[in-house]
């Protein structure tokens, strides 16, 4: 039996069923996809009208009832919502029938800025997300159960309470069942890097999942040492993959690279197919719009526990007008303008990925406790790091937690904490969580 089916039975989801539907709908025409979207949008808005006070009030105000929905154009009548709007009106975004919705999970999401939102999703929305992901595995040529190497960010601060231990155990079981080997990319010491390289050489790894910049650094080391190996697929996430990354992955690892795009609030928005002409929008699950400044506005058609209708997530992207040569009609995201990401370089030669700081402020609960909206780490010299933040003032204990963790990683650097009213984006309009002026 496919392990997805077993996981469905254990978790109350129906990923496999969705996957079979997506396998079929990947060849649907644009008009067929729009019909799916309209039917789903109608049901979602009906649910919102009945159960979600924010939308019920809004629709009453503009004199709209669900039966008015005749085309997708109705979306334009809905307001664009942001994380801030949801946070201010949190109770009004909570469905009154929440207890009747199956498998609701609450988790915190922060995006790259660190601005926290307690988001909910439900078993149905997760099934759709993972169903689309499983279709993406088909596009990459990966089969469930083949060996996977995960080089993804883990926890920075290890808590020793029972909940954390149960969670750690849960992930150990999941990784065992999915046949994956895991390394923490925040460990950049030479012996960890050597272990990863040795794993790549000795094990029959089919797919690596990781951050493009981390993998790029790893491949640079392998290139310098004259090491080559064969890993058919690289799947990148969380930051833009550049052409130079893809070229080096091909040269050193012989890999085809595949990118995906989503955000903490709405996952699985788009996936790259084997034609590599862009990322196909999962039109069965989301309606993607962009405004005149290329800002993404996204509607999640499946999440009834926390409806995101016309959600502005602060990312910018370009949607291509050309169709993909693979024959699928799902529109292509040609470029994610997203974020520019740097590393901090330590006194000991180690480097810290931007996501390390992100995990640190979340794991320590500082983001939540101090209502952190944005942070930025700047390195101007080898021995001093500036930690800029938009939040309530950090206590000396909190500064010590951040400082000690960073120093444990990269040596005895000075850390200056600077509280800001706002942290502007770079001239290109991109938010940069880490700026390294040494590079
Ligand atoms: Zn394609």
Image (spheres, rainbow, N blue to C red):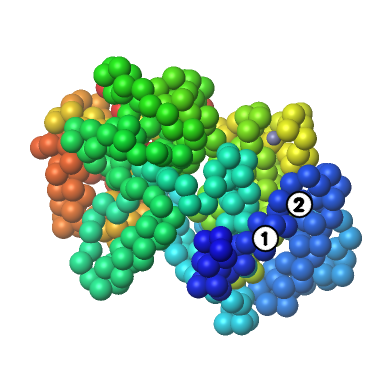
Question: Closest to the observer: 243 or 143?
Answer: 143
Give neighbour class at mark 1: few <14, some 14-19, many 20+ (Cα, 10 Å): many
Is residue 236 in view? no
What's the mark number on residue 24?
2
Of the image marks 2 and 1, the number of the one nearer the N terminus: 1
> Quadrant of residue 52 in the image?
bottom right
Residue at 40% across / 22% down in the picture?
252
Expressed as whole percent of the image width and height from the top left, the position of residue 361 reads 30, 53
Residue 157 visible in the snapshot: yes
Q: Would residue 118 appear left or right of 267 to someone viewing this image? A: left
Note whether 259 is above or below 92 in the view shown: above
Q: Write the residue at 44% across / 64% down.
A: 107
Give the structural element (helix, strand or loop) at label 1.
Answer: helix
In the picture, which quadrant includes the N terminus? bottom right
Q: What is the x, y in percent for residue 68?
A: 87, 66
Q: Quadrant of ligand 1?
A: top right
Question: Does 201 sit left or right of 123 as displayed?
Answer: left
Locate residue 28, reporting x and y percent. Answer: 81, 47
- Vertical relation: 280 (above or below) 80: above
Q: Nearer the viewer, residue 26 or 126?
A: 26
Viewer-side residue, 420 vs 89: 89
Residue where numbered disc 1 is placed: 18
């Amino acid at each position: 039996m496919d392990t997805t089916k077993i996981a469905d039975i254990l978790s109350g989801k129906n990923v496999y069923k969705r996957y079979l539907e997506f396998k079929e709908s990947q060849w649907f025409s644009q008009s067929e996809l729009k019909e799916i979207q309209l039917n789903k949008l109608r049901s979602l808005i009906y649910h919102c009208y009945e159960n979600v006070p924010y939308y019920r009030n809004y629709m009453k105000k503009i004199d709209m009832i669900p039966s008015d929905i005749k085309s997708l154009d109705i979306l334009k009548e809905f307001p664009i919502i942001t994380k801030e709007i949801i946070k201010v009106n949190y109770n009004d975004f909570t469905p009154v029938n929440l207890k009747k919705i199956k498998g609701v999970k609450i988790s915190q999401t922060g995006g790259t800025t660190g601005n926290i939102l307690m988001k909910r999703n439900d078993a149905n929305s997760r099934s759709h997300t993972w169903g689309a992901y499983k279709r993406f595995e088909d596009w990459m040529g990966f089969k469930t159960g083949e060996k996977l190497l995960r080089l993804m960010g883990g926890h920075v601060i290890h808590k020793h309470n029972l909940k954390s231990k149960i969670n750690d155990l849960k992930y150990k079981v999941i990784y065992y069942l999915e046949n994956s080997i895991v390394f923490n990319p925040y460990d950049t010491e030479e012996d960890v890097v050597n272990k990863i390289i040795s794993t790549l050489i000795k094990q029959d790894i089919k797919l690596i999942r990781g951050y493009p910049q981390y993998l790029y650094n790893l491949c640079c080391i392998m290139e310098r040492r004259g090491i080559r190996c064969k890993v058919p697929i690289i799947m990148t996430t969380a930051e833009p993959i550049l052409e130079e990354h893809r070229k080096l992955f091909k040269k050193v690892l012989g890999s085809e690279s595949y990118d995906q795009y989503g955000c903490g609030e709405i996952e699985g928005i788009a996936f790259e197919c084997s034609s590599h002409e862009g990322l196909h929008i999962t039109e069965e699950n989301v309606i993607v719009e962009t405004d005149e400044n290329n800002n993404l506005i996204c509607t999640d058609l499946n999440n009834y526990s926390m409806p995101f209708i016309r959600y502005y997530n602060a990312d910018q992207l370009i949607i291509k007008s050309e169709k993909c040569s693979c024959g699928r009609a799902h529109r292509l995201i040609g470029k994610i303008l997203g974020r520019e990401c740097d590393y901090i370089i330590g006194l000991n030669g180690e480097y810290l990925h931007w996501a390390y700081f992100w995990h640190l402020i979340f794991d320590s609960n500082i983001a939540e406790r101090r209502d952190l909206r944005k942070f930025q780490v700047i390195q101007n010299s080898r021995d001093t790091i500036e930690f800029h933040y938009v939040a309530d003032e950090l206590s000396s204990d909190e500064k010590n937690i951040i400082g000690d963790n960073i120093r444990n990683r990269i040596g005895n650097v000075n850390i200056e904490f600077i509280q800001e009213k706002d942290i502007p984006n770079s001239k290109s309009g991109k938010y940069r969580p880490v700026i390294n002026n040494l590079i």
